Amino acid sequence: MISSSIAERPPGPLVLGLGCERGTPAEEVITLAEKALVQAGADKADIGFVASLDARRGEPAIHAAADHFSVEARFFDAATLEAEAPRLQNPSAIVFAHTGCHGVAEGAALVGAGSASVLLVAKITSSHATVAIAGPAEQRPATLATAAP
């Protein structure tokens, strides 16, 4: 049977990890996320969902970013994010002191993308937010793949 309707595209394989201070403007988070997408060589449709620390579940900027990318926001507890500490490119003792995990954006992206994932864009920061992108290793741009150990 042939259908004339166009099927909705399934969620992309990439996970956008977000961390931000309370009250961060949504535009700051969205602008930073768009910058990360450019670095990853990806586009909006490649994002499967937005991920963050459960302590930020009520943060409007995170939900605004999820709405911007037309995906859901998923939240993980600090212990789950901390389990990713060995895979973080930018672990932070300061972040740990405030959250109980060494990295929110990178950790959330890695947890969300699964155990076989890699960071495609390590943590990038703005004044009040951090973002990272994780996904399957085969999604890694060739310039990053050649630099990997």
Image (tube, rainbow, N blue to C red):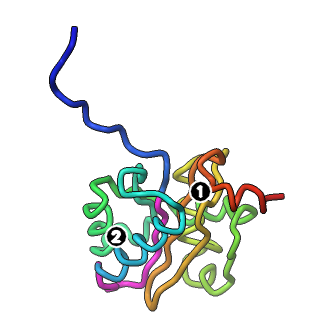
Magenta residues, as a range?
16-26
Q: Amino acid at mark 2?
A: Ile
- Image position, residue 10 (x, y; %): 35, 38
Q: Is residue 87 magenta?
A: no
- Image position, residue 75 (x, y; %): 43, 59
- Sooner in the amino-acid sequence: mark 2 or mark 1: 2
- The disc placed on residue 110 is 1
Question: Residue at 69% of width from left, 61% of height from top?
Answer: 143
Count of number-bearing discs:
2
Q: Is residue 78 above or below residue 21?
A: above
Question: Residue at 50% of width from left, 78% of height from top?
Answer: 130
Residue carrying label 2: 62
Seen from the viewer's position, the closer of residues 125 and 42 is: 42
Q: Is residue 110 above or below residue 129?
A: above
In the figure, is residue 131 to the left or right of 85?
left
In the figure, is residue 101 to the left or right of 22?
right
- Image position, residue 53 (x, y; %): 47, 67
Q: Secondary structure at mark 2?
A: helix
Quarter of the C terminus within the rendering: bottom right
User: Do callouts 2 and 1 mark residues in contact (Cβ within 8 Å)?
Assistant: no
Q: Is residue 66 above or below residue 48?
A: below
